[in-house]
Amino acid sequence: MNTWKDAHHRSILKAVSWRFFGSITTMLIIFAFTGKVVLSVGIGIVEVFVKLLVYYLHERMWDRIGVGKKKHPLTALPVEKPLTEEHMQEIKEKLKVLGYISKA
């Protein structure tokens, strides 16, 4: 189970890649209906920025919604400071001994 949330830059990169394909599709559809390249590209450019912002906000909103997310039981532990690499290794070894993670 993953307890990590997507970083803001990951949401931005996902939004940019999605908008690239979405905008190309929109421009092709507009061109197919109108036959006007300038109109198609103009609408495509405006659409990129508007839908990029909307997608980003949508992505961040869904990151706050718990529907479909599973919370790992260890997240309930009251850890008061960052774990060192040494302590992380000790914890991993103990979890292996207890059978919670594989020995590999």
Image: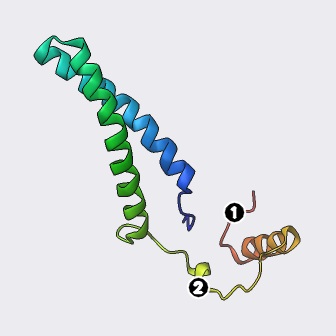
Q: Secondary structure at mark 2?
A: helix
Above or below, 9 against 69 in this view is above
Image position, residue 22 (x, y; %) = 32, 32
Amino acid type, mark 1: Ser
Amino acid type, mark 2: Ala
> Is residue 7 rendered to the left or right of residue 25?
right
The residue shown at (32%, 43%) is 51
Extreme-bottom residue of the structure: 78
Mark 1 Cα-neighbour bin, 10 Å: few <14, some 14–19, many ≥20: few
Image position, residue 46 (x, y; %) = 31, 33
Above or below, 91 against 25 in this view is below
The residue shown at (66%, 88%) is 78
Q: Quadrant of the N terminus?
A: bottom right
Specify which label sits upstream in the sequence, 2 or 1. 2
The foreground one among 53 and 13 is 53
Q: Quadrant of residue 36 in the image?
A: top left
> Is residue 14 rendered to the left or right of residue 21?
right
Image position, residue 31 (x, y; %) = 19, 16
Extreme-right residue of the structure: 86
Above or below, 46 against 98 in this view is above
Q: Dot 1 corresponds to which residue?
A: 102
Q: Dot 2 corresponds to which residue?
A: 76
The residue shown at (39%, 72%) is 66
Q: Secondary structure at mark 1?
A: loop
Its colouring scheme is: rainbow
Image position, residue 38 (x, y; %) = 25, 15
> Is residue 21 rendered to the left or right of residue 84?
left
Q: Quadrant of the C terminus?
A: bottom right
The foreground one among 31 and 102 is 31
Q: What's the distance in space between the residues labelled 2 and 1, CA to CA?
A: 22 Å
- Numbered label tally: 2
